[in-house]
Image: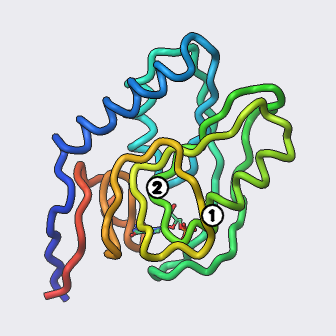
């Protein structure tokens, strides 16, 4: 089976949008400290670029989540595989996601994090596929709305491959 990858969002388009999101977050939080909660694994590339586009006193923590198996359909089951390293009580936090698809994962994470009494919880996602929404999720900081295609690259995988592609693409089977 050979695979052909078609570019959906190239490096320049992503870099420009990430810079804009960073500037928007910097302006809205002014000089307040902020915690970025990076949802592993898919968000690690986006978060690395986003963090460097934010000019605030920033703390970064990681949350390991598994919502997909090896396939491409959401199970709706969210398993925490790695918890935050520190409490977030009283802190302003932004959950950094690669993609909001059905919305089940991020909705679950918001509920979970609220129980820890942060000052505020917002969502930043590079991508959003509204066609597949199963729960309503308000994405506060959104990179791109995309059509209903399974995307890879820039941190996103297909069976653990392609996370290192520097752009977002769609796999087409030849
Ligand atoms: P949701 O719970 O919103 O359906 O799915 C969220 C997670 O599913 C994302 O963080 C991501 O890991 C995975 N996911 C959803 N859509 C895609 C996609 O098009 N490509 C890849 N690689 N992962 C996806």
**Residue at the location (60% across, 70% down)?**
67
Residue 160, percent across and down? 42, 67
Residues at marks 2 and 1, CA–CA distance in whole angstroms? 12 Å
| Image quadrant in which the N terminus is located | bottom left
Residue 117, percent across and down? 85, 37
Q: Is residue 149 left or right of residue 63?
A: left
What residue does disc 1 label?
Answer: 105
22 to 33, vertically: above or below: below
Is disc 1's CB within 8 Å of ligand 1?
yes
Mark 2 or 1, closer to the camera: 1
Would you say the residues marked 2 and 1 are in contact, meaning their CB atoms lie under 8 Å apart? no
Is disc 2's CB within 8 Å of ligand 1?
yes
Q: How many marks?
A: 2
8 to 69, vertically: above or below: above
> Along the polypeptide, which appears first: circle 2 or circle 1?
2
**Residue at the location (67% across, 60% down)?**
107
Q: Say which quarter of the image contains residue 108.
A: bottom right
Residue 24, percent across and down? 42, 27
Q: Say which quarter of the image contains residue 80.
A: bottom right
134 to 155, vertically: above or below: below
| Image quadrant in which the C terminus is located | bottom left
What residue does disc 2 label?
Answer: 42
Front residue of 15 and 4: 15
Q: Secondary structure at mark 2?
A: loop
Q: Secondary structure at mark 1?
A: helix
109 to 34, vertically: above or below: below
Q: Is residue 69 left or right of residue 113?
A: left
Residue 146, percent across and down? 32, 64
Q: Residues within 10 Å of mark 1 (few under 14, many from 20)?
A: many
**Residue at the location (19% across, 80% down)?**
172
Q: Residues within 10 Å of mark 2 (few under 14, many from 20)?
A: many
**Residue at the location (62% across, 41% down)?**
122
């Amino acid at each position: 089976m050979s695979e052909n990858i078609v570019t959906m969002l190239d490096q320049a388009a992503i870099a420009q949008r990430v810079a804009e999101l960073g500037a928007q977050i910097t302006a809205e939080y002014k000089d307040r400290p902020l915690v970025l909660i990076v949802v592993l694994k898919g968000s690690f590339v986006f978060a690395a670029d986003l963090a460097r586009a934010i000019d605030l006193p920033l703390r970064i923590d990681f949350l390991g989540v598994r919502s997909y198996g090896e396939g491409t359909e959401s199970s709706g089951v969210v398993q925490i595989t790695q918890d935050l390293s520190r409490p977030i009580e009283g802190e302003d936090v932004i959950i950094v996601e690669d993609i909001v698809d059905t919305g089940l994962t991020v909705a679950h994470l918001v509920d979970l994090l609220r129980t820890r009494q942060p000052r505020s919880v917002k969502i930043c996602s590079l991508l959003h596929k509204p066609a597949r929404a199963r729960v309503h999720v308000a994405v506060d900081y959104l990179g791109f709305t995309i059509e209903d295609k399974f995307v890879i690259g820039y941190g996103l995988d297909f069976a653990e491959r392609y996370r290192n592609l520097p752009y977002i693409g769609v796999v087409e089977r030849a």
